């Protein structure tokens, strides 16, 4: 196994709680990536899963995992010094653009947006984060966004904190109140992304969103992550809203492990 | 040497009565799980597109990791994931009226499975069916049944008898004698043989001390297997009269020319799509025309099998 085959060993150096049921795992790994890219993370005898990189730093990469299934629970229970294999980084990441970008995060969709926000700050621009969750306890990586010193607007479905309603509703209100936002980034549940894409189109704001689909090969051959003629692993996971608005399956169809088309909700 | 102007070179080919604008087909298992992706391959210039292998019922396939990139190619153990023949009708509908030549790849455990699947593929508008008698990493299917000439012959014969479109048999190289498998398919009435499928392989992660694929075993594809594919096509050409579709590690025009000179009438392209994307089709087609022009071949029939002369 050689490094030029996009395969590295990650050694867990530390973990950090990232929200309710969510853990950030930071690995020592020789991987250079751009925000929005992902890695296929393999735990032998368990599974290999696609993970957005939530932390990108010299000699380190991090993932933020919500413990929901077998693989994610196993990842969250890793101990310092444990090793995983990481294939990647794969896919197309975000393009940093705009003087005053708005970032919209829903649930664990915060993960790829954190290094993006950091990159935007580093580029000298001032991003604003709109972050949504069902309830206050479910915000993901909110402390890390706060550490960047950026403006944060919060929304909860139950009104337990901030705006009562969805992140996309809060986004609309934010755009209504102040018109100088010049780019829009989003990651989260696909219904949210669909709303944000609609808003971007209506208001003619350039932007991008990171998508999620079942991934097997991760390198553009198996087709399991197809969304119409696009491959999320290779053409994405980050797409321009203009691309997404042209895809029939965006916001409506996902495929299961067998490739059967399933309606989203 | 007589040169032909590139404009005079014709790379169209008639294969089992089907006209292909060029000999480069999308190999089964590469992107062919959805109608949209098959259509994209057609629009990118593929002469024909072969679907992912479809079985009777939906199947999730093997657990990840299912692909591992290694020197000279990649090893996959997808494990025949597919939506099942019933649901696949909606993918085939996407291709209706597109002008794409669609070849339906099917797999089963016994003749009767293949017959049912072939009839469905025919009813969905496939131009031909390709029998997957060669997947090296799915228990009870593929190479496990396709390594036996008698089984190859009986499955092929059963399918040929039940449909009116051509039947291609895709053969495994994981055998002592691929020529006998080819002859069995020919005896069974196949219109063409496809060679080769992937070579059974394994990689081990030395740091994690485990086989690098969830299924442990997989199939090696890509440039590493091209010499094996060339040898198999060469042997088949000496043993069967039906056309041979060459596949295995074709990355550029000279690879394509090698297979044609070994005796291939048409070709399938797979692993190169990983690094080059679907533009590999037009790149290889243009390269092949340029090569043929330079070398004085005005069409494929003049180049086919010349290595045997």
Image: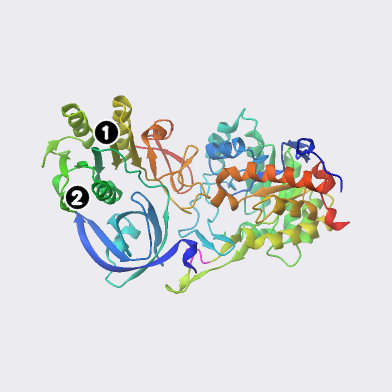
Residue corresponding to mark 2: A145
Magenta region, mostly helix, strand or loop?
A: loop
Magenta segment includes B213: yes
Mark yes or no: residue B167 visible. Answer: no
* Residue A143 spot, x, y in % from top left: 16, 53
* Residue A114 spot, x, y in % from top left: 25, 50
In this rendering, the answer to whether A133 lies above or below A245 is below
Question: Looking at the rendering, which quadrant does residue A247 occupy?
Answer: top left
Residue corresponding to mark 1: A182
In the rendered image, residues at marks 1 and 2 fall on the same chain: yes
Q: Please give the name of the residue rendered at 25% of the width and 41% of the height, measured from the top-left corner.
A: A103
Name the one closer to the observer, B122 or A33.
A33
Question: Mark 2 falls on what kind of element?
Answer: helix
Question: Mark 1 falls on what kind of element?
Answer: loop
Question: Looking at the rendering, which quadrant does residue A105 occupy?
Answer: top left
Q: Residue furthest front?
A: A124
In this rendering, the answer to whether B167 lies above or below A43 is above
* Residue A213 spot, x, y in % from top left: 40, 46
Q: Is residue B169 left or right of residue A70?
A: right
Q: Nearer the viewer, mark 1 or mark 2?
A: 1
The label number, if any, that marks residue A129 in the structure image: none
- Badge 2: few (under 14), some or many (20 or more) residues near its Cα, within 10 Å? many
Mark yes or no: residue B39 visible. Answer: yes
* Residue A22 spot, x, y in % from top left: 23, 56
Q: Residue furthest top?
A: A202
Q: Please give the name of the residue rendered at 13% of the width and 36% of the height, measured from the top-left corner.
A: A163
Q: Which residues are magenta?
A: B212-216
- Badge 1: few (under 14), some or many (20 or more) residues near its Cα, within 10 Å? some
Q: In which quadrant will I find the C terminus of chain A? A: top left
Could you give the CA–CA distance between mark 1 and mark 2, rounded to whole angstroms?
20 Å
Magenta segment includes B256: no
């Amino acid at each position: 196994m050689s490094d030029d085959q996009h395969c590295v060993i990650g050694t867990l150096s530390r973990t950090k709680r990232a929200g309710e049921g969510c853990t950030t795992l930071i690995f020592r790994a020789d991987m250079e990536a751009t925000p929005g890219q992902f890695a296929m993370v393999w735990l032998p005898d368990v599974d290999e899963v696609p993970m957005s990189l939530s932390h990108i730093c010299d000699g380190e990469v991090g993932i933020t995992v919500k413990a929901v299934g077998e693989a994610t629970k196993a990842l969250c229970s890793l101990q310092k010094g444990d090793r995983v294999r990481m294939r990647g980084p794969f896919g197309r990441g975000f393009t940093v653009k705009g003087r005053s970008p708005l970032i919209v995060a829903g649930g664990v969709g915060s993960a790829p947006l954190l290094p993006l926000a950091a990159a935007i700050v580093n580029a000298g621009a001032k991003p604003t984060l709109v972050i949504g969750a069902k309830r206050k306890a479910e915000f993901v990586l909110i402390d890390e966004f706060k550490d960047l010193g950026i403006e944060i607007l919060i929304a909860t479905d139950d009104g337990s904190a901030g705006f009562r309603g969805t992140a996309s509703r809060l986004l609309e209100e934010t755009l209504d109140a102040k018109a100088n936002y010049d780019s829009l980034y989003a990651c989260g549940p696909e219904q949210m992304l669909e709303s944000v894409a609609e808003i971007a189109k209506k208001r003619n704001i350039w932007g991008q969103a990171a998508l999620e689909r079942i991934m097997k090969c991760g390198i553009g051959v198996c087709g399991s992550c197809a969304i119409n003629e696009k491959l999320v692993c290779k053409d994405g996971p980050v797409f321009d809203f203009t691309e997404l608005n042209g895809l029939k399956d965006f916001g409506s169809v996902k495929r299961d492990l067998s490739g059967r088309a399933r309606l989203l909700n | 040497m007589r040169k032909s102007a590139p404009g005079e070179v014709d790379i169209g080919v008639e294969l089992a009565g089907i006209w292909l604008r060029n000999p480069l087909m999308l190999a089964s298992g590469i992107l062919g799980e959805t109608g949209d992706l098959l259509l994209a391959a057609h629009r990118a210039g593929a002469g024909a597109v072969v679907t992912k292998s479809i079985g009777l019922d939906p199947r999730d396939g093997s657990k990840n990791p299912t692909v591992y990139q290694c020197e000279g190619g990649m090893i996959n153990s997808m494990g025949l994931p597919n939506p099942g023949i019933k649901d696949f009708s909606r993918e085939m509908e996407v291709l209706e009226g597109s002008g794409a030549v669609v070849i339906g790849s099917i797999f089963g455990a016994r003749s009767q499975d293949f017959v049912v699947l072939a009839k469905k593929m025919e009813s969905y508008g496939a131009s031909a069916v390709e029998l997957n008698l060669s997947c090296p990493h799915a228990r009870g299917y593929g190479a496990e049944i396709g390594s036996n000439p008698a089984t190859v012959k009986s499955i092929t014969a059963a399918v040929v008898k039940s449909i009116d479109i051509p039947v291609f048999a895709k053969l495994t190289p994981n055998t002592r004698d691929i020529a006998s498998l080819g002859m069995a398919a020919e005896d069974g009435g196949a219109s063409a043989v496809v060679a080769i499928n992937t070579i059974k392989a394994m990689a081990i992660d030395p740091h994690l001390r485990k086989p690098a694929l969830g299924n442990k075993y997989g199939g090696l594809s890509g440039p590493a297997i091209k010499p094996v594919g060339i040898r198999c096509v060469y042997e088949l050409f000496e043993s069967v009269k039906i056309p041979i579709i060459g596949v295995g590690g074709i990355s550029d025009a000279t690879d394509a020319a090698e297979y044609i000179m070994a005796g291939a009438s048409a070709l399938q392209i797979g692993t190169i799509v990983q690094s080059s994307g679907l533009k590999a089709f037009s790149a290889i087609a243009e390269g092949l025309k340029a090569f043929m022009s330079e070398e004085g071949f005005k069409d494929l029939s003049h180049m086919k099998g010349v290595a045997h002369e």
